Amino acid sequence: MSFAEFSTQYLFPGVIFVVMFGLGLSLTPVAFANIVRVPRAVAVGLAGQMLFLPIVAIGVALLLPLPEPIRLGLIILAACPGGSTSNAIVFALRGETALSVTLTALSSLLSIVTIPFIIGLGFVLVSGDEATLALPAGTMMQRLFMMTALPILLGMTVRALIPGPALASLRFFRVLSLVLILMIIAISVRDAFHLIEDNALEIITAAVTLAVLVVSGAYVIGRLARLDRGKRIAITVEVGVQNTPLALVIGATLLGLPELNIVPVAYGVLNYLLIALLLLGLRYAAPATGRAPGAAVDPRRP
């Protein structure tokens, strides 16, 4: 077995399992209380994540003159739930961290169903070829469950059974997750380096266009929904920051198309910078919103 085969079959899924297990360790059932406490904010956040983001990504893929791997990479990225680092970003920007945690957990669990649907529909609209989707939806849902929902539930179970050791291990899992994520990003860049060389301008254009439209659009949606600033920040970050490692796994492992992975990598790097530029001022322009009671977020999170 070659290293490339080992990476796509075992290493990439293993990284996602570790990242999602760490997310589960940070959650308790109380974190889902926001569904009842602030249902409008949760609904707006999920709608932004699962409707607004894919629609914008499909629009960008159809309107910009992009090579097909880049267009399909946009669809995969938009199908993914919020990234595990979004909670830390919301905390740093003094947004409502409890809402961010709820949206990350809910979108990650729901993605088992939404990812195959969004990718299937997006691929047909963008490429006109349903055969581009290499896996049946049922098979993809099963594999996504094993890589996302199962480790989240296992992490929550461990947190419930041994809360002390679980909390003590959170920092270790965060550092380990970061190292593993950087590793699979480096592998993805290596595997798609020829695409970067030939289409660097198109890749940057696609990533920046999507990031600007999504981040600014999500914040406007929060204002139109008359949500307070803390909730708007949380929703903007959740809609704007995607689970890049999961996108890499979908492209390289589930679909067997590693050349699709360069867009998620580029978007992830550029979007962090954009969110910092658009929202950092809010940290000083508004008082801290704090975290809702019961949110299972480690206050020592950097």
Image: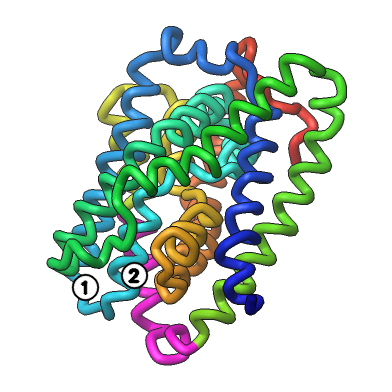
**Residue named by callout 2:** 206
Q: Quadrant of the N terminus?
A: bottom right
Locate the C terminus and report the quarter of the image it occupies.
Answer: top right
Q: Residue at position x 39%, y 63% from top?
A: 255
Task: Determine whether 136 is above or below 262 in the image.
Answer: above
Residue stretch rendered in magenta on the structure = 194-213
Give left or right: position of 281 versus 78.
Answer: right
Residue 21 spot, x, y in % from top left = 66, 37
Which residue sits at x=34%, y=80%? 202
* Residue identifier under label 1: 64
Q: Quadrant of residue 11?
A: bottom right
Of callouts 2 and 1, which one flags the residue occurring earlier in the amino acid sequence?
1
Q: Which of the numbered marks, if any, corresponds to residue 171?
A: none
**Colour pattern:** rainbow
The amino acid beneath tag 1 is Leu
Look at label 2 and name its amino acid: Ala
Residues at marks 2 and 1 touching, judged by CB atoms closer than 8 Å = yes
* 297, above or below 196, in the image: above
- The percent coordinates of residue 242 (x first, y second) are 47, 49
